[in-house]
Amino acid sequence: MWKIKNKMIMLVLVLILAVTAIPIGSFAANNNDIKVTINGKQLYFDVNPLSIDGRILVPMRGIFEALAAEIK
């Protein structure tokens, strides 16, 4: 009986260790975490900025309008 209880405790501990060892942080990062700020004011776009191969793609129209550029 004692051996079975020890085995169950060890199994539970191994399962807890296995689940907590997974790097959750890499899965949590997504494109919604990208924030664009100009002159201390955060910008919001109709299309979210994207991170592709280490490069950030941002809708330029929103940036130009925030800088009071004329768009034709």
Image (cartoon, rainbow, N blue to C red):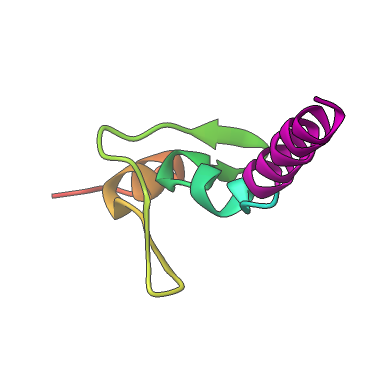
Residue 60 in magenta stretch: no
In this rendering, the answer to whether 2 lies above or below 21 is above
Q: Main secondary structure of the magenta part?
A: helix
The percent coordinates of residue 44 (x first, y second) are: 41, 31
- Looking at the rendered image, the quarter that the N terminus falls into is top right
In this rendering, the answer to whether 40 lies above or below 72 is above
Counting labels gives: 0
Q: Which span is picked out in magenta? A: 1-20
The percent coordinates of residue 6 (x first, y second) are: 83, 34
In the rendered structure, the answer to whether residue 51 lies left or right of residue 41 reads left
Is residue 34 visible in this depiction of the protein?
A: no
Instruction: Out of 16 and 68, give the one closest to the viewer.
Output: 16
At 70% from the left edge and 39% from the top edge, which residue is drawn? 11
Instruction: Out of 71 and 20, give the one closest to the viewer.
Output: 20
In the rendered structure, the answer to whether residue 8 lies left or right of residue 29 reads right
In this rendering, the answer to whether 9 lies above or below 33 is above
In the rendered structure, the answer to whether residue 50 lies left or right of residue 13 reads left
At 75% from the left edge and 32% from the top edge, which residue is drawn? 4
At 31% from the left edge and 54% from the top edge, which residue is drawn? 60
In this rendering, the answer to whether 43 lies above or below 53 is above
The percent coordinates of residue 3 (x first, y second) are: 82, 36
Is residue 27 visible in this depiction of the protein?
A: yes
Q: Residue furthest front?
A: 1
The percent coordinates of residue 22 (x first, y second) are: 62, 51
Instruction: Out of 35 and 14, give the one closest to the viewer.
Output: 14
Displayed quadrant of residue 66: top left
At 75% from the left edge and 38% from the top edge, which residue is drawn? 7
